[in-house]
Amino acid sequence: MGSFSIWHWLIVLVIVLLVFGTKKLRNIGSDLGGAVKGFKDGMKEGDSGAAADAPQQKIVNGQTIDGEAREKVDNGRS
């Protein structure tokens, strides 16, 4: 009762093909592939965006100092 033999898996595959058909299985496969690709792209964008948005930390004498880099804005005042 441990694992199934190759014949068991072939019979299961034939039954699945008969029930769903090859076209529906192909559509499911392409949809699943697109979802995985979108997930990977989202993870890459999230990692690059998180690194840019994270505040910088500086350690001075064993103490952590949190800070943000801000851009100097010139309002036209002299």
Image (cartoon, rainbow, N blue to C red):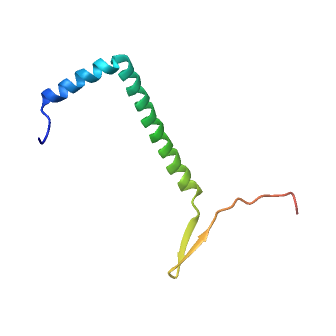
Please tell me which residue lies in front, 60 or 14: 14
Above-or-below relation of 64 to 21: below
Q: On the rendered structure, is 9 left or right of 40?
A: left
User: Quadrant of residue 66 in the image?
Assistant: bottom right
**Tally of marks:** 0
Looking at the figure, which quarter contains the C terminus? bottom right
Residue occupying the point 77% across, 58% down: 73
Residue occupying the point 13% across, 27% down: 7
User: Where residue 34 appears, x then y in whole percent?
Assistant: 45, 31
Residue occupying the point 28% across, 23% down: 16
User: Where residue 11 appears, x then y in whole percent?
Assistant: 19, 24
User: Quadrant of residue 74 in the image?
Assistant: bottom right
User: Where residue 26 appears, x then y in whole percent?
Assistant: 37, 21
User: Quadrant of residue 33 in the image?
Assistant: top left
Above-or-below relation of 18 to 46: above
Residue occupying the point 11% across, 41% down: 1
Above-or-below relation of 22 to 58: above
Please tell me which residue lies in front, 52 or 75: 52
Please tell me which residue lies in front, 15 or 52: 15
Q: On the rendered structure, is 38 left or right of 11?
A: right
